[in-house]
Amino acid sequence: MSTDDVYEQALDTASELLGQRLELPMSPGEPASGADFRKVATVHTFGDSWTRTALSTHDRSLVSVAIAATLGAFEPLRGQLRIALNNDVTHDEIVDLFIHLAVYAGAARAFETYQVALSVFAENASSDPV
């Protein structure tokens, strides 16, 4: 299988998880090698990790939200929250995750990243049965 085929398969997996095509546009002034970074990161994430089967997509989604929140990685956290909500993780499960995060990663980090969850919940308010 070619590198382009592997990349396309990873994009297909990302699209299934997100419920829409993953878009990673180049930024103004970004060197052409930025496209290589996007391909490597996409294949590693959505081709190598999300396709494994020992964890369910639901559980992998919760783990991914917890990791991004603990790291304070706001944009990845937004994406992981969208993936989680698209894969049947409930708002209540995410709130419990943040309660657990407050105990183990600190209340300040949990509160700060919970604000990102609230903004994603608001985006999703009309389509998610609470």
Image (cartoon, rainbow, N blue to C red):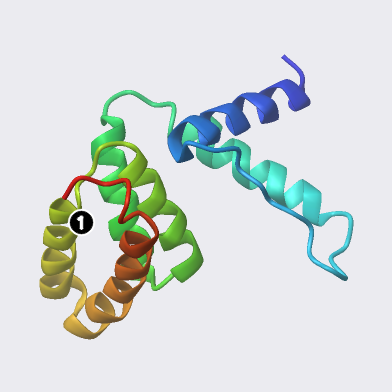
- Pointer 1 residue: 94
- Quarter holding residue 10: top right
Residue 96, given in percent of the width and then of the height, sits at 11, 60
Q: Is residue 130 left or right of residue 52?
A: left
Picture layout, residue 34 above or below residue 47: below
Residue 6, given in percent of the width and then of the height, sits at 67, 24
- Quarter holding residue 122: bottom left
Residue 97, given in percent of the width and then of the height, sits at 17, 59
Where disc 1 sits, the SS reads helix
Picture layout, residue 129 above or below residue 102: above
Extreme-top residue of the structure: 1
Which quadrant is home to the N terminus? top right
Extreme-bottom residue of the structure: 108
Q: Is residue 8 left or right of residue 87?
A: right
Q: Is residue 26 left or right of residue 39?
A: right
| Observer-nearest of 41 and 9 | 9
Residue 52, given in percent of the width and then of the height, sits at 39, 26
Q: Residue at x 20, y 54 (%)?
A: 91
- Quarter holding residue 56: top left
Question: What is the count of numbered marks?
Answer: 1
Picture layout, residue 44 above or below residue 55: below
| Observer-nearest of 47 and 130 | 130
Residue type for callout 1: Ile
**Residue count near mark 1 (Cα–Cα under 10 Å), binned few <14, some 14–19, many ≥20:** some
Q: Residue at x 75, y 26 (%)?
A: 3
Q: Residue at x 62, y 24 (%)?
A: 9
Q: Residue at x 61, y 33 (%)?
A: 11
